[in-house]
Image (cartoon, coloured by chain):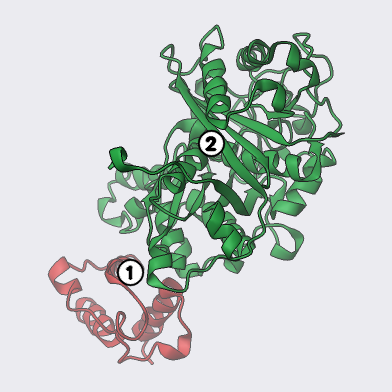
Amino acid sequence: MSETAEKVKKIVVEHLGVDEAKVTEDASFIDDLGADSLDTVELVMAFEEAFGVEIPDDAAEKITTVKDAIAYIDGQKG
Amino acid sequence: MFAQSAAPRRVVVTGMGIACPLGLGVERVWKRLVEGESGIAAIQSFDVKDLPAKIAGQVPVGAKAEGKLDLAEWIPVKDQKKMDRFIQLAVVAAVEAVEDSGWMPEDEESRCATGVMIGSGIGGLTTIYESSQLIAQGKHKRVSPFFIPSALINLASGHVSIRYGFKGPNHAVVTACATGVHALGDAARLIAFGDADVMVAGGAEAAVSEIGMAGFCASRALSTGYNDTPAEASRPWDEGRDGFVMGEGAGVVVLEEYEHAKRRGAKIYAEVIGYGMSGDAHHITAPSDTGDGAYRSMRSALKSAGVTPGEVQYVNAHGTSTPLGDDLELGAVERLWGDDGKTLAMSSTKSAIGHLLGAAGAVEGIFSILAIRDGVAPPTLNLEKASKESPIDRVAKVAQERKIDVALSNSFGFGGTNASIVFRAAP
């Protein structure tokens, strides 16, 4: 697992209070991990803080799974 | 609407919950209160070096089994950050009250007949403070999406309704330190007038924080002379009193229409028989110098209860331990009770837990109900020498066994708002 993936999963576990095993790369924040729309806003803010990146609203809307988050963050860093 | 209202229905108390500086759990808190213990201590949770008042009553931290608060035992971690502390405390007290009542509606009609009215004097003060700091640092984008719903006062009622699926009236009182009594009284009226059959009602407050303490210090309301002896700081009516002691916590009761409670065989603690309100129209923080607002509030409550002052054996006073307020309230009680004052017991339980602001009236309402149930007037701690002589027994330092059928509880708030509620032994 990449460093980004590990960090993203840790943030998701902390913020959504879910079991680590459930946080697979395909997991959807809303459908699989019990998040609501406010939770996802907060989650994106946590990613911004942790990785020092800016995620504009239109990009944030497209981040619905763990995999989406990892890809977006890696894209920004690369 | 009102023109077609039937006669008011009777309202009883079938569940109670407390989180306060004497701990969690009604029975434990009551036992400690009657035994004369104090919940006031030096503030450890933040730096108080620049504050003139350095003590408060805070909910003790620890395991539920010890009557202390470990939030993880009550609210999922994910949800805790969506609630200011006042909401968290409200939820804790509401869970105890609802479980105690045994009321869990199983059909839609019953859910829609069950409402929530939990108020707060100040609400999410700490959350507002922390979010403001982000703005001051230019971090507008770091403000949490949970900031607003965490700070809003009616979200205590909101969270409790969501947790249990209570779909009846969802409301919140905001009348400073009178909030708790207004919430109980208003909720009882909703039941009496048929808007609901069951109401989860109370008050919650969590203003023991840097900004809360600084604000009340600035208004010169807090005790500052007993920082080294915290348990002696709250001393209602005593000549050495110098201001109130801040407290935090929540009190919640389950109010229920009498026939509804009887039908399901609920345990009934007491009946809410009267409720009165008044306004001082005098000053933003000081009580009116005649005590007339307190007098009219109590008179109105007794009138709605249909009892005379002589039929009331116990008053749980507002009695905050401030130089002005205590004796004005005493004077108002003397005026209303007249000769019957000789047989009355009146105490201030703020002497043990401090002033819980918007939660005070709800917690003290519960103490009044327990005074009836157990025939015990809880003590006024630290009342060594009263600043004003009175025929009224203020239960100095030690609890008294008394036959108590009817009890009245007072709460008065900034803005000149006054409320009194009257309970009678279970019918």
Q: Mark 2 lies on which chain?
A: B
Give me the disc on residue B76.
none
Say which of marks 2 and 1 sits in front.
2
Residue B240 to residue B169: above or below: above
Percent position of residue B173, x then y = 42, 40
Distance between the alpha carbons at the discs numbered 2 and 1: 35 Å
Percent position of residue B9, x then y = 48, 46
The residue labelled by disc 2 is B181
Q: Name the foreground residue: B308 vs B236.
A: B308
Query: In the figure, residue A25 lies in which quadrant?
Result: bottom left
Query: In the figure, residue B398 lies in which quadrant?
Result: top right
Q: Name the foreground residue: B392 vs B41.
A: B392
Please, which residue is most extreme toward the left here?
A58
Chain with green colouring: B
Q: Is residue B393 visible?
A: no
The residue lying at 62 percent from left, 60 percent from top is B96
Q: Name the foreground residue: A70 vs A23.
A: A23
The residue lying at 33 percent from left, 57 percent from top is B144
Residue B147 to residue B185: above or below: below
- In the rendered structure, the answer to whether residue A69 lies left or right of residue B375 reads left
In the rendered image of the structure, the colour used to display chain A is: red
Q: Which amino acid does label 1 sit on?
A: Asp
The residue labelled by disc 1 is A39
Residue A58 to residue B243: above or below: below
Query: In the figure, residue A75 lies in which quadrant?
Result: bottom left
Percent position of residue A52, x then y = 30, 67
Q: Is mark 2 on a helix, strand or loop?
A: helix
The residue lying at 66 percent from left, 39 percent from top is B424
Q: Is residue B409 visible?
A: yes
Percent position of residue B341, x then y = 74, 16
